[in-house]
């Protein structure tokens, strides 16, 4: 009996040793050696996991930075230049300072309220509504107002305006992660440079219909007349498919296009209001004139 127990123990010991050796070589074959620098880069990141960098999350972004060895083509929007500088120090590389950006809503829904052609009573989702419904104003390109962009924002930087039913961006909270732009099925939200003193000029319309048709849906629709492009000194405006577009990398915010646009489709943001000239004082008649 004792001999049988010893044999069983010996067999089990040999089998255990055999599998231990097998597991050791398997572990050596498939082990993943992770650079500790990845953890250091990940700690610098804000941890929002917003996907604005184009990666699956902050960890994936850190892995991409370390694997590449520099920040070429890689940028953490919520972190901005401050985080970029810290990552560059860890990687031992240089990084250029980027232009701060902000999300802008390119739609003029406030002037569509009195032109509603139908009412939608269904699932409150822009993504779903876009597949089955044109929109209350009849504009197939305008904001649908269900707030998918608001749900996508992790920084509480965008809210629906109850008066207009359209999103409004808080530029102080916006990190330009692009989540709201990706969530909008009609691509009316765009990331643009904030500009000097946070002043921006852009075409607040994405309607590509011909002018007469577009104006039926919105009084401020771009009609593609090209007047703005003719007065632009920097050739920053192009016309394509009946729609004007201002290249923010070329625009110097001279605002000539703003005053030239016949439908006021071009808006200027954060510019001071023009000074109102005082009315001229009536001339006081002289004594001779009063005597007459």
Image (cartoon, rainbow, N blue to C red):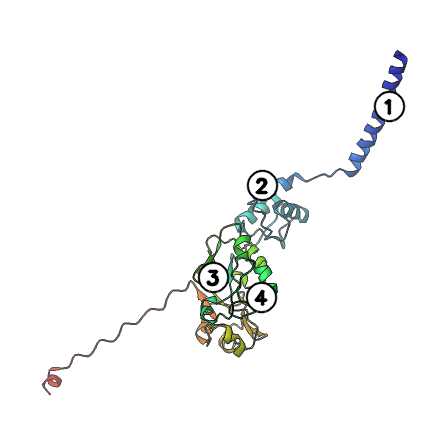
Measuring from the top left, give residue 251's x and y in whole percent: 51, 68
Is 91 placed left or right of 101 in the picture?
right
Residue drawn at x 56%, y 46% as measured from the top left: 48
Q: Is tag 2's residue or tag 4's residue first in the polypeptide sequence?
A: 2
Residues at marks 3 and 4, CA–CA distance in whole angstroms:
16 Å
From the viewer's perspective, is the residue at label 2 or at label 3 nearer?
3
Say which mark, if any, is on residue 133. 4
Residue at the far top in the pictured view? 2
From the viewer's perspective, is the residue at label 2 or at label 1 nearer?
1
Q: Are marks 2 and 1 in contact (CB under 8 Å)?
A: no
- Mark 2 — residue? 43
Q: Is tag 3's residue or tag 4's residue first in the polypeptide sequence?
A: 4
From the viewer's perspective, is the residue at label 1 or at label 3 nearer?
3
Label 4 sits on a secondary structure element that is loop
Frontmost residue, 268 versus 242: 242
Label 2 sits on a secondary structure element that is helix
Residue drawn at x 54%, y 77% as measured from the top left: 213
Q: Is tag 2's residue or tag 1's residue first in the polypeptide sequence?
A: 1
Residues packed near mark 2 inside 10 Å, few (<14), some (14 to 19) or many (20 plus): some
Say which mark, if any, is on residue 14. 1
Say which mark, if any, is on residue 165. 3
Q: Is tag 2's residue or tag 3's residue first in the polypeptide sequence?
A: 2
């Amino acid at each position: 009996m004792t001999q049988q127990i010893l044999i069983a123990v010996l067999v089990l010991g040999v089998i255990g040793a055999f599998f231990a050796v097998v597991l050791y070589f398997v572990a050596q074959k498939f082990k993943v050696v992770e650079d500790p620098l990845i953890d250091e880069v990940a700690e610098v990141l804000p941890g929002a996991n917003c996907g604005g960098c184009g990666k699956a999350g902050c960890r994936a972004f850190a892995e991409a930075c370390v694997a590449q060895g520099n920040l070429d083509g890689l940028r953490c929007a919520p972190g901005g230049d401050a985080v970029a500088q810290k990552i560059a120090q860890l990687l031992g590389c240089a990084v250029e300072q980027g232009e701060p950006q902000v999300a802008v809503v390119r739609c003029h829904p406030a002037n569509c309220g009195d032109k509603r052609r139908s009412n939608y009573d269904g699932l409150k989702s822009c993504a779903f509504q876009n597949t089955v419904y044109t929109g209350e104003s009849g504009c197939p390109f305008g904001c649908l107002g269900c707030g998918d962009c608001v749900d996508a924002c992790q920084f509480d930087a965008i809210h629906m305006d109850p008066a207009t039913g359209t999103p409004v961006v808080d530029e102080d909270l916006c990190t330009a992660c692009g989540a709201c732009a990706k969530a909008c099925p009609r691509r009316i939200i765009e990331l643009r440079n904030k500009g000097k003193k946070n002043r921006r000029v852009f075409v607040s319309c994405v309607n590509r219909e011909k002018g007469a048709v577009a104006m039926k849906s919105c009084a401020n629709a771009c009609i593609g007349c090209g007047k703005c492009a003719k007065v632009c000194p920097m050739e920053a405006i192009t016309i394509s498919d009946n729609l004007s577009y201002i290249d923010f990398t070329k625009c110097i915010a001279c605002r000539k296009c703003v005053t030239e646009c016949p439908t006021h489709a071009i808006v200027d943001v954060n510019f001071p209001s023009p000074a109102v000239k005082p009315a001229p004082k009536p001339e006081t008649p002289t004594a001779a004139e009063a005597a007459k």
